[in-house]
Image: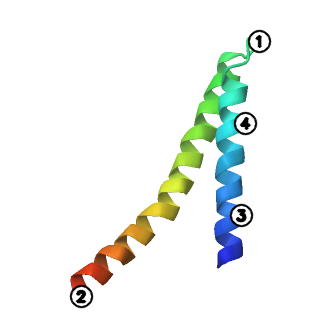
Amino acid sequence: MKTFRRIQKIAAAVGLVYGFWISNQMEATGQDIRTGLLLVALSIVVLLGMVLPEEMKNEERRMKN
């Protein structure tokens, strides 16, 4: 499970960096900009998918105690 989390973190970081880079190029076409912003959005979804389940677990633990 730790390996999967590490892969998710790396993929999200690469997606954010590459997405911002590709969408901010001076020669970027409209399609390039949309693709870059789509990569950024998908990376944010991956990061939220990592954070929210842990928050739910923490909330359940607090409710039990």
Quarter of the N terminus within the rendering: bottom right
Residue at x 73%, y 11% (from the top left corner): 26
Quarter of the C terminus within the rendering: bottom left
Q: Name the residue under label 2.
A: 65
Which label's residue is closer to the chain start, 3 or 2?
3
Which label's residue is closer to the chain start, 2 or 1?
1
Amino acid, disc 1: Glu
Q: How far apart are marks 4 and 2 (CA)?
A: 43 Å
Q: Do the residues labelled 4 and 2 touch (CB within 8 Å)?
A: no
Q: Residues within 10 Å of mark 1 (few under 14, many from 20)?
A: few
Which label's residue is closer to the chain start, 3 or 4?
3
Residue 24 vertical placement versus 16 (above, below):
above
Q: Distance between the residues labelled 3 and 2?
A: 33 Å
Residue at the outermost front position: 65
Q: Mark 4 points at which residue?
A: 18
Q: Mark 1 points at which residue?
A: 27
